[in-house]
Image: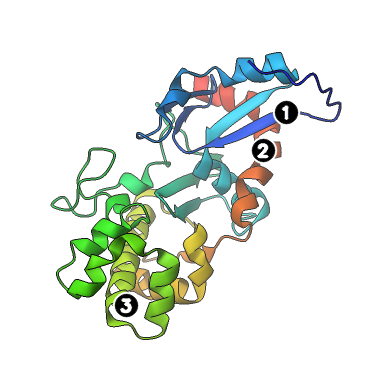
Amino acid sequence: MYNSGVQITDLAGISLAFPGIVDVKHYQVLATNDKYDDACDLNLRLWCELNWGVPFYMDNDTRLATIGEWECGAAQGLNNVVMMTIGTGIGTGVVLDGRVLYGEHYQAGSLGGHFVIDYKGRKCSCGNVGCVEALSSSFFLPYIIKENPKLSASFRENADNYDFEKIFNWASHGDVDALIVRNECMDVWSAAIITYIHAYDPQVIVLGGGVMKSKDVILPYIRERVGKLAWCPSSVVKILASELGDNAAILASEYCFKNKKRRNEILSA
């Protein structure tokens, strides 16, 4: 283990937002979906104590971002919140009746990217078939394009060179192929959001991730589609863009340290 010898006097603790399933009671990575599997063998809390002498906290990255938006951002003051982050993968976090959702195995609310919306669809990296992530994330974007028979051959041939920024840019200029890809991905995100609404009954859905640079296109499209298809007889669920961006998980750290003891009591109950 590395110790720099540098004395830091104003460090209150170290918090890590990790893209995987995390045991938030023992601060251990449980699963990473083939991304950073060596992390499962690391004792990060011990490393933190030995090298820095401060408390350590770790949680799923999107769950922390959800807490940040709930405490300081777009969902501030609400008790029932779902956040969806769209990027390399699809992440989710849930606050239900004013409490962050964890579940028996610390994965409740965080696997929204692996909800099945097409049981005959593409195989996901998690091993399941038809996951939201497999049908609409940037990691799978080359496959989404290559396997779509509606697209021109020339567009499919260059699929490895495309990302969502290019797709949304070309679509805004009327490119037919880009429009198909963009709208089909937004249809998948909408289907996922409808499922989250039916599962968790939130007051608000907060959307985050780099793709939200195109929120002026994404929000109206998804709001209209979800408004038509979601079963919400009492009131419309708000669909908003993240206010905190990449800072959401960072701003959650203070809340998590303050509530660590209470949360562990809840998980142990």
Q: Amino acid at mark 1?
A: Gly
- Residue drawn at x 42%, y 82% is 172
Image quadrant where residue 16 sits: top right
Where residue 193 appears, as percent x and y from the top left, is 37, 59
| Numbered circles on residues, count | 3
The answer to whether residue 86 is above or below residue 157 is above
- Residue drawn at x 50%, y 45% is 62
Check disc 1: other Cα within 10 Å, few if <14, some if 14-19, many if 20+.
Answer: some
Do labels 2 and 3 touch, CB within 8 Å? no
Where residue 6 appears, as percent x and y from the top left, is 82, 23
The answer to whether residue 189 is above or below residue 262 is below
Q: Disc 2 versus disc 3: distance between alpha carbons?
A: 39 Å
- Residue drawn at x 78%, y 29% is 12
Q: Which residue is mark 3?
A: 179
The answer to whether residue 4 is above or below residue 118 is above
Q: Disc 3 versus disc 1: distance between alpha carbons?
A: 46 Å
Please name which of the two marks, 3 or 1, marks the residue nearer to the observer. Answer: 3
Q: Amino acid at mark 3?
A: Leu
Q: Which residue is mark 2?
A: 253
Do labels 1 and 2 touch, CB within 8 Å? yes
Q: Residue furthest bottom?
A: 174
Q: Which residue is mark 1?
A: 13
